[in-house]
Amino acid sequence: MTIPVLRTERLLLREWRDSDLAPFAALNADPSVVRYLPRPLTRQESDDFVRRRIHPSFAAHGFGLWAVERLDTGVFIGFVGLTEQTFQAPFTPAVEVGWRLARAHWGHGFATEAARASIDLGFGEAGLTEIVSMTVPANRRSRAVMERLGMTRDAEADFDHPRVPTGSPLVAHVLYRLTRDRWAARQRVDG
């Protein structure tokens, strides 16, 4: 299996390496990074996420959640990419663009930059017709990234996430969508 490598102005989206596992586990244990997730991950859960969820996605679809590295420092900063969501919701199955970056790398536009490259591959090479993104309503930073990507909130499709425990303040999620046609129109304007 060949994993596509994506290069942006400042970032390299690449295959995962064993050396990424420790810093990935550290960011998955950081309370500020997982604030809008049900809980921090243990080292084993973090490693399993890479081996059992990320690697198989590339094998099955040719896309997934890439390890992201800064070109200027070579430092691993987290993941960004596309993942298939198959949990029960009115809009699934769907392909989601998502990101999780170490706190030290927030506020530099890295999530937006890498997500754009992922979306370009999704609508280009992968031939997707729609990409979604989702988060809890309070996650303003991620929602701002979604909007910078040209995604539009579909308030009628907001949902309670079935993988979040009932009664949790994180169960309610907002849904954003981007169609290939809207992406292509934006490409023509930006290009």
Image (cartoon, helix red, strand yellow):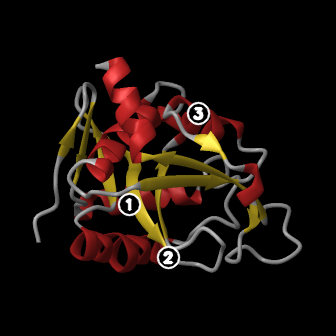
Residue at the left extreme?
2
Q: In which quarter of the image is the C terminus?
A: top left
* Of 74 and 9, the residue lying toward us: 9
Which callout, 2 or 1, points to the residue nearer the camera?
A: 2
Which callout, 2 or 3, points to the residue nearer the camera?
A: 3
Residue at image position (56%, 52%) is: 133
Q: Quadrant of the N terminus?
A: bottom left
Residue at the right extreme?
167
Residue at image position (25%, 58%) is: 126
Residue that label 1 marks? 22
Q: Which amino acid does label 1 sit on?
A: Ala
Q: Which amino acid does label 2 sit on?
A: Glu
Q: What element carries label 2?
A: helix
Residue that label 2 marks? 45
Q: How crowded is mark 2: few (under 14 residues within 10 Å), some or many (20 or more)?
A: some
Residue at image position (33%, 28%) is: 187
Residue that label 3 marks? 147
Rounded to the nearest whole Å, what is the CA distance between mark 2 and mark 1? 12 Å
Of labels 3 and 1, earlier in sequence is 1
Which callout, 3 or 1, points to the residue nearer the camera?
A: 3
Residue at image position (68%, 49%) is: 154
Rounded to the nearest whole Å, what is the CA distance between mark 2 and mark 3? 31 Å
In the visual, does 7 lie left or right of 95?
Answer: left
In the visual, does 188 lie left or right of 166?
Answer: left
Residue at the top extreme?
190
Of labels 2 and 1, earlier in sequence is 1
